[in-house]
Image: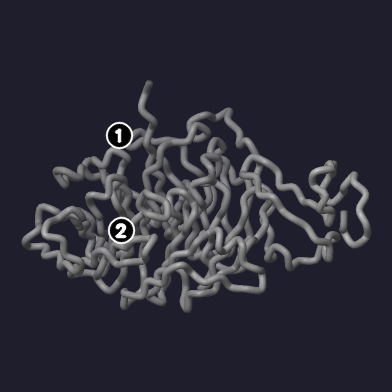
Amino acid sequence: MAAPMEVALVTDAAGPLCNCSAWELHSGSALPGYRGGNSGPRALALLGGEHLLGAQLGKSYINVWELQRKDQLQQKIICPGPVTCLTASPNGLYILVGVAESIYLWEVSNGNLLAILNRHYQDLTCLCFTDDSSHFLSGAKDCLALVWNLYSVLQAEPSQIPDPRHVWSRHSLPITDLCCGFGGPLARAATASLDQTAKLWEVSSGELLLSVLFDVGIMAVTLDLSEYHMFCGGMDGSIFQVDLCAWPVQRDRTFQTERENGKVFKGHRSQVTCLSVSTDGSLLLSGSHDETVRLWDIQSKQCLKTMNHKGAVTNAFIVLAPANMLNPDGKPSTPLPKFSKHLHGTESSDEQGSEGLTLRLGLHQQSLLFGPCRNLEKATWRRPGKCTHRCTPQGKR
């Protein structure tokens, strides 16, 4: 059985030919790109292995492509303001979007806007989920990184703003990037900042595990899958490799370039904007404002391939190619709904004033709306809000 194909997805600020280019990681062969507009930084995401999302640079909408239909846009998600960052949950059920200092949470199965979180004081810069979709992290120009429990956010009343699980305030300048490892709520997360540090945290306890000081501001950060190394992209174009298993263990460390020259990737001429590691941990993908994307051999620090672009690279990451990306005849199992502009539960509707219960059954099943009847053992539900069991006007059995 052949190994899954790894694909690099790349966007730049110019995008004259296509919004997102794609190429096979190991062979370097180009794949058809996704056309229409150009995506902003930290604003490109795969959704459920069936769709690609890209927030239009400086605009108030998100472009949506079906993975197998690369030549045209299928949908646009209208947002309340210019999108600064976005991400999708690994299970394909939720979309997070940063607009100014607010986080918007949509449910994919029905398009409902479930929450608007306003706990940052300045514009959002980055968002990411844990691998099990139970938590998400947000970073902003207010120097704060917040950890959110998704289920606590979903259970909160619309009139309440839920509290984040952790507030990380050890950075002194804006957060530029976030990365979360494997392990769900027990994972470790890395943050990068203009204050010339990259920090490693424990999601469950919120404890700071490691802080590394560099000579330049850090614009991008990522971890390899085994979490032996942390890679940090600097404003001067250098990429630093930090050993997370170094002995003796030090929580505060200074990366001395002249002494650790064998752990620096050199080749970019301007700031590094994005980093991603292959699944086997042997290759590093980097994008930069110098309008190039480079593929590096991690062990030797040699640049294996350079891809030239027409503008500053805004997104570059490695993914295992979903089946629909390589199958031109494939179709999404469920079409995306129209995404609501209003917070769920606050907009006017025909059902307003009736009690109800929404069951979220997943991406590939419809949500059912139960009416005021509570006799669930005897009742059969033919359509939303209509019950075949006779109930009193007060909703009693």
Q: Residue at x 37, y 44 (%)?
A: 318
* Res. 9 image quadrant: top left
Q: Which residue is mark 1?
A: 26
- 29 and 262: which one is in front? 262
The x, y position of residue 320, in whole percent, is 41, 37
Label 2 vs label 1, nearer the camera: 2
Task: Name the image quarter holding the N terminus.
Answer: top left
The x, y position of residue 195, in whole percent, is 27, 74
Tell me the amino acid under the disc marked 1. His
Q: Is residue 193 left or right of residue 84?
A: left
Q: Is residue 82 left or right of residue 228?
A: right
Tell me the amino acid under the disc marked 2. Val
Q: Which residue is mark 2?
A: 221
- On residue 101, which mark appears? none
- 283 and 226: which one is in front? 226
Relative to 86, say whether 195 is above or below. Answer: below
Mark 2 or 1, nearer chain start: 1
Q: Is residue 217 left or right of residue 347?
A: left
- Distance, label 2 to label 1, CA atoms, is 22 Å
Query: Do the residues under discs 2 and 1 have CB atoms within 8 angstroms?
Result: no
- 233 and 226: which one is in front? 226
Q: Furthest residue to the front?
A: 397
* Residue 39 in sight here: no
* Residue 105 in sight here: yes
- 124 and 149: which one is in front? 149
* Res. 343 image quadrant: bottom right
